[in-house]
Amino acid sequence: MRRRARGAGEVVEVGAGVTSLQEGDHVVLSFIPSCGRCPSCAMGRQHLCDYGSILLGGRQISDNTSRHHSAKGEDLGTMCLTGTFAPFTVVNEASCVKIDDWIPLDKAALLGCGVTTGWGSAVNAANVQAGETVVVIGLGGIGMNAVQGAALAGARHLIAVDPIEWKREAAVSTFGATHAAASVEEAQALLAEMTWGANAEKVILTTGVATGELIQPMMGMVSKGGRGVVTAVAPIAQEDVKLSLFDLSMQRKELVGCIFGNANPRRDITRLLRLYEDGKLKLDELMTRTYTLDEINQGYQDMLDGKNLRGVIKY
């Protein structure tokens, strides 16, 4: 595969047994593969495909071997079975979602993880309904797309929370938020005022890292019968969570997890690209900067410094 942008590319060769792709096809690389046959896929939960159990192994789905090697011949693992930090890569067809060849690959690449995850956090996991009040905590490449999803789903009040001023401004001016706050405490006060103390039907956590201390403040903003969604990923050993169990049951609140926007990538990636074509989903505005491969460390630093929403490597 010739890699033109992070997470999307053109098929240059197919191996034996591949039935769904051919040379010249344009594809988005889905960070979670979907086989279409396991119980989760059959139930419409492709984000929970059984292939996800080997996601971090770095070896091929088909035979558990490596197709990437160092100059010394040592086997190399590929992150999420895609290996997008290279101009060429070898992936299983389960990781490829075919797209129309007129869609710019640098924009399509954004759908391989962040856009779909954020959008689905609002539309699928939170199930935002028209007229609801929604809070999104954290405005990175996932959180900003949760804002987009909630806005297009019809949220009446949509508070975007982030300490970085230009991100808050972009959330309101470009991506559909109605209000912005620099902290959870500021959002709590704003929310109480605008809802007369009723709080938000949906609150979505999309911070860079999830910690146990964030859960109670998040759930404290959820209304009676409302839902809190945790999309942010916690350290694998994180077990301690601060949460009022009395409040959880007595106000019938829901706390749910979310991975890849609880999406079906083979359906949702192409559906989101249709919205982009119609001008309803903003992808160009998400691309703060492009990088060459040798600028990758700068790209990571810019992300950590809050200087971009999405940085894209182009080959």
Image (cartoon, helix red, strand yellow):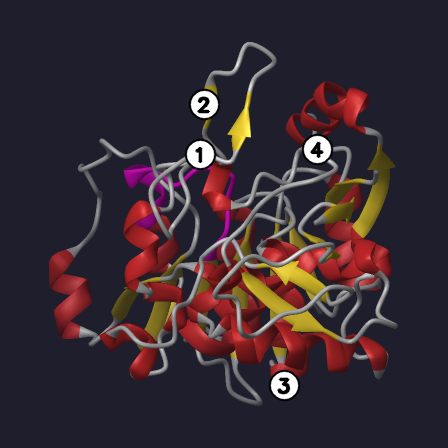
Question: Between marks 1 and 3, how big is the CA–CA gap?
Answer: 46 Å
Point 27% across, 34% down: residue: 236
Residue 65 point in image, percent of width and height: 38, 37
- Which of the two discs, 4 and 1, labels the residue nearer the N terminus? 1
The answer to whether mark 2 and mark 4 are in CB contact below 8 A is no
Q: Secondary structure at mark 3?
A: loop
User: How crowded is the residue under tag 3: few (<14 C-alpha within 10 Å), some, or many (20+)?
Assistant: some
Q: Is residue 18 left or right of residue 279?
A: left
Q: Secondary structure at mark 1?
A: loop
Kind of residue sitting beneath label 1: Ser
Q: Say if residue 49 shows up in the picture.
A: yes
Q: Nearer the viewer, mark 3 or mark 2?
A: 2
Q: Earlier in the sequence, mark 2 or mark 1?
A: 1
- Residue type pointed to by label 3: Gly
Residue at image coords 21%, 50%: 243
Residue 258 included in the magenta stretch of the image:
no
Q: Which residue is mark 2?
A: 75
Q: CA distance from mark 4 to mark 1?
A: 35 Å
Q: Nearer the viewer, residue 123 or 161?
A: 123
Magenta stretch in the rendered image: 205-216
- Contact? badges 2 and 1 (CB < 8 Å): yes
x, y percent for residue 17: 47, 65
- Residue 197 figure quarter: bottom left
Q: Give how far across and how far down residue 205 sits, in percent.
A: 45, 54
Q: Which mark is residue 154?
A: 3
Q: CA distance from mark 2 to mark 4?
A: 34 Å
Q: Which mark is residue 23?
A: none
* Helix, strand or loop status at disc 4: loop
Cα distance between the residues tagged 4 and 3: 28 Å
**Mark number displayed over residue 306:** 4
